[in-house]
Image (tube, grey):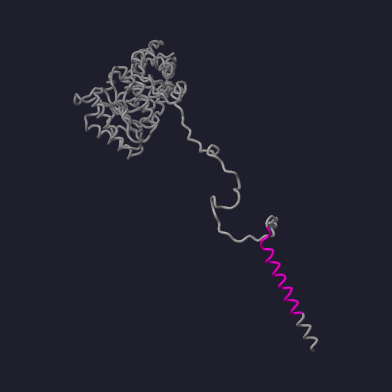
Amino acid sequence: MEIVILVVVIAVVALGAIGGLVVSGRKKKAVPPAGQAQAPAATRAAPPVEPQVGEDADGAPEAPGRTVTEVGLPEAPEVREAPTAPEAEAEAAAAPAEPEIETPEPAAGRLVRLRARLSRSQNSLGKGLLTLLSREHLDEETWEEVEDTLLTADVGVGPTQELVERLRERVRVLGTRTPDELRGLLRDELLTLVGPDLDRTVHTETRGPVDRPGVALVVGVNGTGKTTTTGKLARVLVADGKSVVLGAADTFRAAAVDQLETWGKRVGARTVRGPEGGDPASVAFDAVKEGTEESADVVLIDTAGRLHTKTGLMDELGKVKRVVEKQGPVDEVLLVLDATTGQNGLVQARVFAEVVDITGIVLTKLDGTAKGGIVVAVQRELGVPVKLVGLGEGPDDLAPFEPAAFVDALVDGD
């Protein structure tokens, strides 16, 4: 038992001695002698330190510093240089140029050219009638063909019956029917139908106060050439030495307003316009007012092209006329009709006449169709004359209507 106790004591003493040696070795290893290399960083525990910046920071910077000249500055915004003379000319050429002021063709020269064109386009009616009347035997079947030819040319039922009755009577009395006699006979009867004694003057002279210009309203359905006719009529008036102001009262179509303004610029006529979708009556009123202030001779007002079936829009057209008349009477109301629409054009004419007092008719697109009888039919329907005819798309293809020239073109065509 004593032996066991002794062994335990010896073991405890040995363990204590070994522990003291280890602690002593660690203390001696904390600071190495001067001149001796330090242990690798991987085996040395660094004491915790406070983070520092600037010159107080330990260690070398990750990359060498750069001088001011080495630091890239932000690029300055690009400054566009003033265009050189050639560049300025190129830019000016690219921009839409203002139309040059033109000198319209005088009415006399225009009529000579239009007579020839009318003759080429309308003579089929006259040739057909002369062929039928030249038959040896004018029986009932032949007269029915004459009647059908006139109806096909849109002369209308009433005028056709009148013409056939007079032709039958005169042929019976005449007895002989040489080509020249027949041509003269047909010309006389057609001229009577067209109405050579009607007043076809476009009234642009004011009938009211002397300090107000003449006022003309141009009305009609879209697609008949209404805006173009207004522009061409301005050319006719300028060619006659009159000063013109245009009123762009078709405010629902920006293209129509721009088109009318272009027509005006070509002849030096001012165009009064309003905001898109604005009140047409207000634009018409302003046009007459400015025309008066500028001492213009004529104010032409292009109204909105309304469908004759739209009652509300037609009422608005009547409002335009009433508003304009607050400054004085309207001197002319021109209804523009497409000659190719035939009997449908008569329906349009009838409804427009109920809304505004039509004083004259403009027939457009009279070239290229043998339906010249619409002249007779529309005059008979409205009781007002055809005053102007359009025979093409050229700027000067609008001329006063001359009954004798029209009938000559029918019966004496090429």
Viewer-closest of 14 and 259: 14
Tell me where residue 11 sits by quadrant. bottom right
Q: Is residue 24 magenta?
A: yes
User: Is the magenta region chiefly helix, strand or loop?
Assistant: helix
Quarter placement of the N terminus: bottom right
Residue at image point 72% right, 71% down = 21
Task: Name above or below for residue 233 compared with residue 176.
Answer: below
The location of residue 72, given as percent across then percent down, is 54, 38
Left or right: 247 as drawn, with respect to 48 = left
The residue at the far left in this view is: 209
Quadrant for residue 372, please give it: top left
On the question of residue 159 being in view, the answer is: no
Residue numbers of the magenta segment: 11-33
Q: Which of these two is toward me, 283 or 106?
A: 283
Q: Residue furthest front?
A: 34
Splitting the image into 4 quarters, where does residue 387 fall? top left
Quick check: 80 left or right of 238? right
Query: Residue 206: horizontal and vertical position, in percent?
Result: 22, 24
Please determine whether, in this image, residue 323 is positioned above or below residue 182: below
Q: Which quadrant does the C terminus fall into? A: top left
Query: Residue 164, position in %: x, y?
Result: 37, 21
The image position of residue 97, as x and y in percent, is 41, 24
**Is residue 370 in view from this perspective?**
yes
Query: Is 172 inside the magenta-drawn segment?
Result: no
The mark tally for this picture is 0
68 versus 202 height, above or below = below
